[in-house]
Amino acid sequence: MPRLQDKIALITGSAAGIGLATAQLFAAEGAHVYITDVDGEGAAKAAAELTGRGLGATAMTVDVSRGQDVSALMRTIEQQHKKLDVVVNNAGINVRTDFRNMSDADWVRLREVNLDGIIRIARDAFPLMKASGRASLVNLASIMGHRGMRTLAAYGATKGAISALTRGLAVEFAPFGIRVNALAPGFIETALTERVLRIDAFSKALIEQTPLRRFGTAEDVAQAVLFFASDESAFITGAELAVDGGMQAML
C-alpha cells in the first residue's frame, strides 16, 4: 500500500528542486499534493504533469512572506479537504554577501522567507493539522545552520533558527497529534546551488569534505522527507536528520 494513501499534503516552494521532487514522490505514494510557489506558472506545470498521470495535485501561487497568500491557501485547503496530514516547509531563498556589507533589505528578505514564512505556515496550518489527528510537519533547515561559510552567515542564522523552532514546535504541537521534525541538507544539486557548484575549486573542496564523495540530489532529500511524513517515523518528533553525505561528521 502506498505510504501516503489518501493523505493531504502541502509543500511550499515546490515548483522546482527539492520541493518538486518531494511533490512528485508524495503524489506517487498516494497523497493529494498542494504544489505552492512564488512561480505560479511553474507550480501549475508541475501539478498538470501529475494530474496527467492520474495523480492528485493542486497548484497555487503563494509567497510565504505574504500573510494574505498564506491565509488564502489555508482557506482553499479547508474548503476542499478540511484537513492537512503533511506540511513541508521547503520554500527558501539565499543571498550570498559579505556580512559586513549586507544591506538591511537583504537581511529582511532572507528572514521574511526563510524564517517568518515557516512560522506563518506552521501557525496558520495548525487547525488543519489538528483536524488530521496524525499530522506531520517537516521543516527544511540546512547544514549551514551548524557550520560556517563565508558569505553565508545570515543564511545560516535563518536555518539555525529553524532547527530551534522545530524543537519548540515538537513540544507544543505533540498534544494535538502533530509531529514536527527537520532535515538539514548538505550541498544538493539544484538550481539554487548550480552557480557555485560549477566553480571547480569550490566544488572539489566540498567533495573532499563529504565522506560519500558526491553531492546530494533533490530525490535524496525527498526520500528523507517521505520518511518523516509517513507512519514509519510515528514515534519521532523534535528530531533533525542530516542529509549531507556525512559532511557534518567530518572534523
Image: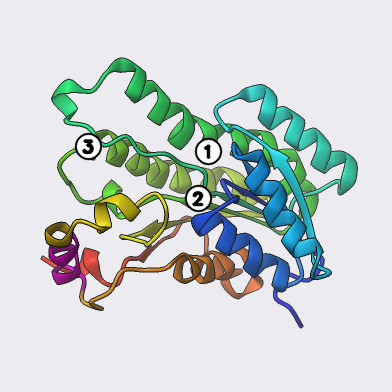
Alpha-carbon distance for marks 2 and 3?
20 Å
Q: Secondary structure at mark 1?
A: helix
- Circle 1 packing at 10 Å, graded few (<14), some (14-19), many (20+), is many
* Quadrant assignment for the N terminus: bottom right
Q: What residue did someone put label 3 on? A: 153
210 or 184, which lies in front?
210
Direction from residue 144 to residue 29 in the image, left or right: right
The segment highlighted magenta reads: 203-210
Residue 36 position within the rendered picture, expressed as x and y whole percent measured from the top left: 66, 44
Give the residue type at disc 3: Ala
Q: Position of residue 236 (x, y in %)?
A: 52, 65
Q: Earlier in the sequence, mark 2 or mark 3?
A: 2
Q: Residues within 10 Å of mark 2 (few under 14, many from 20)?
A: many
Gap between marks 1 and 3, in whole Å? Answer: 19 Å
Regarding residue 9, the answer to whether it shows in the image is no
* Residue type highlighted by circle 1: Ile
Residue beneath the point at 18% across and 63% down: 206
Location of mark 1 (residue): 118
Give the residue at mark 2: 139
Q: Amino acid at mark 2?
A: Asn
Residue that sits furthest to the top in the current view: 104
Mark 3: secondary structure: helix
* Residue 97 colored in magenta in the image: no
71 displayed left or right of 174:
right
3D distance between C-alphas at marks 2 and 1: 8 Å
Q: Element under label 2? A: strand
Magenta: predominant secondary structure element? helix
